[in-house]
Amino acid sequence: MSAQQASAQQASAQRRSAPTVIVDDVHVVYRVHGSGTGRGSATSALGRLATRRTLPGTREVHAVKGVSLVARRGEAVGLVGTNGSGKSTLLRTIAGLLPPERGRVYTDGQPSLLGVNAALMNDLSGERNVALGCLAMGMSPEQVRERYSGIVDFSGINERDEFTIHMPMRTYSSGMAARLRFSIAAAKTHDVLLIDEALSTGDSGFQRRSKERIEELREQAGTVFLVSHNNTTIRETCDRTLWLESGVLRMDGPTDEVLAAYEDFAKGRK
Ligand SMILES: Nc1ncnc2c1ncn2[C@@H]1O[C@H](COP(=O)(O)OP(=O)(O)OP(=O)(O)O)[C@@H](O)[C@H]1O
């Protein structure tokens, strides 16, 4: 191998192993107001604002407790844990949608959260949502025109009736809307793509297409985080998995090892 080839190979290896997400001792706390008695007067609310005291009856939920991790280019990282363990909260924090109470999140590039709750405009047609979604991700109108049919075909929305894409989104089932959302987001190469349960919707054909697309996104050197309750999906998609329990990162390692431990734990809880 020539010196030039060796240095090109080294540069490519360095690029692939470059960190894309660093989570440093992150804590996330939700505050639920009004869980106590009565609403209190305006004067007492003003007094609390001035003294920065919290409302009596404010409940705090410490959803993520001191999580640290480093994710690199080319990795697909699964997130597992029982209900309420903090998976969605951690994803939303990495996406920059929730401020950490303590600790820091550093990301290289813009993370995109692809969740079942991501906003699409209900009164607009699927077609308009595809166009707006693509423009919002930074595509030019020309790129939107080029990619439009690919996105609609990928979603499978028009498989039964080719007029469906022109109907308002509010007439779509939640599965159809989730498939369209995934297809729009997956049309772009993301530096960091965060997927929350998106793959659990859709038929087996759509699930296969999504897995293939995640694989492609990974090869294009992005980092993918995937939250799912379906361990088979995690096994097939991710080579590394994080296990969160009660907000604490219990394990971070090769998917097979982490899932084996998690499945043992889940069996013990039944
Ligand atoms: N908006 C909120 N306000 C208050 N508490 C919240 C809020 N969202 C989540 N929580 C609480 O934070 C904790 C973690 O929730 P989170 O949704 O992150 O868990 P999860 O692991 O994604 O759960 P699931 O597997 O059920 O989707 C839970 O105790 C939940 O009740």
Image (cartoon, helix red, strand yellow):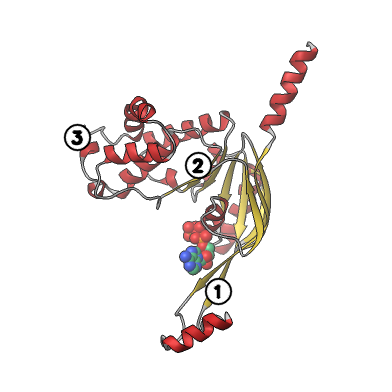
> What amino acid type is highlighted by mark number 2?
Thr
75 vs 170: above or below: above
Q: Position of residue 74 (x, y in %)?
A: 61, 34
Q: Residues within 10 Å of mark 2 (few under 14, many from 20)?
A: some
Q: Earlier in the sequence, mark 2 or mark 3?
A: 3
- Please tell me which residue is depicted at 48% across the width and 88% down the height of the picture: 44
Q: Position of residue 243 (x, y in %)?
A: 62, 53
- State how far apart marks 2 and 3 are (Cα): 31 Å
Q: Which mark is residue 233?
A: 2
Residue receiving disc 1 = 60
For marks 1 and 3, the one nearer the N-term is: 1
Q: Which residue is mark 3?
A: 163
Nearest the eye: 55 or 25: 55
Q: Secondary structure at mark 3?
A: loop
Mark 2 and mark 1: Cα distance apart in space = 33 Å
Mark 3 Cβ inside 8 Å of ligand 1: no
